[in-house]
Image (cartoon, helix red, strand yellow):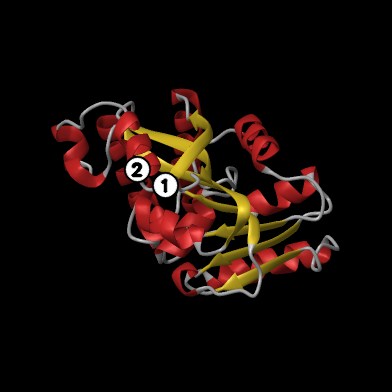
Amino acid sequence: MDRHQISSIAHTDHPVAAPLGDDSVHALLDRALPRGDARLLDLGCGSGTWMTRAHAMRPDLRAEGVDNDADTIAAAQRAVADAGLGDRIVFHAQDAQEFTSPHLYDLVLSIGATHAFGGLLPTLDAARKHLAPGGSILLGDCFWEREPDRAVLDAGFTADEYDDLATTVDRVTADGWTPLYGHVSTLQEWDDYEWSWTGNLSRWALDHPEHPDNGQALKTAAEHRTAWLHGYRGTLGFVTLLLRSTPRP
C-alpha cells in the first residue's frame, strides 16, 4: 500500500486534505474567489475538492488542478465529467513543479502541498509564475504553535522544519507578498481531521480483514494516531493565507 492509497482511504470522510472545517473552507473561498469568468489553479489539488466547492460558489469559474497522483486525478476527472462540469474543471496528472499553461490565473491555490515544492517560499515562487496581474494566492502551510519538544521531534519532525506564526508571516511578506486575510486552524479542526484520517484508515482495515494490506493499514493508522496524540497535538499549527503581490517601490 503506497502513500497515495493510504491518503485516498484516510481522506474518505474529510476530502479537504488539511485541518480545515467546511465553514472555514467556504469563508476562505468567499474572500478569495473573484467574481465573473475568472480562472483558478490548484497546485497539489488531490481529488479536486477545493475546485468543486469553488465552482459551486462561482458557477462562471474555470478551474484547473494539478497533482502527481494519476489514479486520484483520473477518478476526479470522471466525477466532474459525470456532474457535467468537464468543460469547467480540468485536471492534469503531473508534477506540479513542471506544470505549464498558456493561461494566467486570477487565484492560485496550494493548500498543504508545500512539500511538493520544497518548502514555503519555493511554493510561492511556483505560484507566482502562474498568477495574473492583480491575482491572489491562497496558501496553506504548517507552523509551530509552540516550540517543539522531544515528543514532537520523536514523531518525525525537525525543529527547523517550520517557524512560529509571526516568523512564517514575516518570511512571506519579506518575499514580496501582502497578506489580505488569514485563518489559523483551531484545535477542534485539527482533532476532526486527525480522528477522520486515522479512523477512516482503521475502518477500512477492519472492513477488509482478508485484504493483504489490512495489517499495514492498521499499523499506519496506529502509528499516526500515536504521533499525533503523544507528539504534535497542540504544537503543530496550520495557517491559510490569502496573499497578493506587494507593489515594488
Can residue 47 be seen in this snapshot?
A: no
Q: Report x, y in % for residue 153.
A: 18, 40
How many labels were placed on the picture? 2
- 81 and 33: which one is in front? 33
Quarter of the image for residue 126 reads bottom left
Image point (62%, 51%), residue name: 135
Amino acid carrying label 2: it is Ala
Image point (51%, 30%), residue name: 183
Q: Report x, y in % for residue 243.
A: 52, 42
Q: Residues within 10 Å of mark 1 (few under 14, many from 20)?
A: some
Vertical order, 26 against 104 (above or below):
above
What residue is pinned by disc 1?
Answer: 176
Q: Which numbered circle lies on residue 174? A: 2
Quarter of the image for residue 152 reads top left
Quarter of the image containing the N terminus? bottom left
Image point (38%, 36%), residue name: 169
Task: Check disc 2 and report its element: helix, strand or loop.
Answer: helix
Q: Residues within 10 Å of mark 2 (few under 14, many from 20)?
A: few
Image point (47%, 25%), residue name: 186
Among all residues in the image, which is located at the extreme right? 84
